[in-house]
Amino acid sequence: MKRKDFLRITGLAGATALVGSPVAKAAAPPPDSCVLIPSETAGPFPLDLTENNTYFRQDIRESKTGTLLNLKLKIIGAGNCQPMQNVRVNIWHCDKDGLYSGYSQNNNQGQAGLTYLRGYQFTDANGEVNFITIFPGWYTGRICHIHFQVYVSSVYAAISQLTFPLTTKNALYAANSAQYTKGADPLSLNQDNIFSDGYQYQLATLTPNSSNGGYDSYLEVTVQGSGTSALADLEPETGGQFKLGQNYPNPHSGITTVPFTLYNAGDVKLEIFALNGQKVATIERPDLGIGTHQIPINLNALGLAQGTYAYQLAVTNATGAFRQAKIMTAL
């Protein structure tokens, strides 16, 4: 199985995901509630991250320099305000000088074919994804920001942007002026054409990290769905040939089981991927019949450390080849 095949596990490679309707930017929510993230433009430089296998990674810096930023996003289902597992999250943003990879036009010359500061991950059992990047700069007409897309399934995706507290952000620029040579961000949130109508659900935390000299950032993002949304059960890449269950227990201590049901007999392959996109293990079960099956996983026996992995079930039968993936976490 080529690594590019793993990109198709959400059913979005070559497909068009429907975006949720714009959400009014309301006042702060009452305690213990969750509000849909406002929908925003994908911007002039979104690209389709499903078309390039480079993007399945946590560390998206490549050779770009700047202040280290550890970004964590937690995805919440609006239906019950609970974390959503196995949801795909794309992010992309400009570099310290305001340039985006992948395009060469107007004031963004020389960036065509480049892939820096773009990537995606799948949410873990806590509904969280983590990215290692650099703090973005700013460019004329826009305040500093990061784009993100949350793909709940091939029939629904939420697109939005996040930004940071002004005082902390400009203090970061000042403290690292040798790299961020453009100086302080000149815009306020009310002057930015995206955040001027409200930003309370898009304002990520920004906290200095004394251990690595960088910053930590966190934002909770609420999208349509309830917990592990039923939308994800209808993914077309399974072709009605099988149903993949969540491993149990999850999280686990190194030993877990992956359940699945075959609706037609076929050859089954369970592939395990590290979050940098590297395939680290394969378990094969040829010629399985119709019905419910289980594949036990022992990370120690596979020579794998505890951590978070993506597991993909690939089924090949007389009809064709089909696959789907989920995330498992060993604590």
Image (spheres, rainbow, N blue to C red):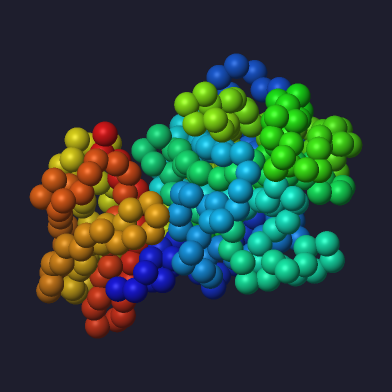
> Is residue 152 among what the camera can see?
no
1 shown above or below 150: below
As rendered, which of 41 and 260 lies closer to the eye?
Answer: 41
187 shown above or below 207: below
* Tally of numbered discs: 0
> Is residue 316 among what the camera can see?
yes
Residue 47 coordinates in the image, percent (x, y): 64, 65
- Image side of residue 233 versus residue 1, left or right: right
User: Would you identify the image quadrant in which residue 199 lies?
Assistant: top right
Q: Which residue does the image show at 19% across and 35% down from the upper left?
A: 253
User: Would you identify the image quadrant in which residue 172 lies?
Assistant: top right
245 shown above or below 202: below
Residue 250 coordinates in the image, percent (x, y): 27, 38
User: In this view, which residue lies farthest toward the top?
Assistant: 31
Q: Which residue does the image show at 46% across and 49% down from the upper left?
A: 58
Q: Which quarter of the rendering shows the N terminus? A: bottom left
Q: Which residue does the image show at 73% across and 69% down from the upper left?
A: 110
As rendered, which of 107 and 82 lies closer to the eye?
Answer: 107
Q: Which quarter of the rendering shows the C terminus? A: top left
Residue 294 coordinates in the image, percent (x, y): 15, 54
Q: Which residue does the image show at 56% across and 45% down from the upper left?
A: 133
As rendered, which of 133 and 199 lies closer to the eye?
Answer: 133
- Image side of residue 186 versus residue 276, left or right: right
User: Would you identify the image quadrant in which residue 9 lies?
Assistant: bottom left
Residue 295 coordinates in the image, percent (x, y): 15, 55
User: In this view, which residue lies farthest toward the front?
Assistant: 178
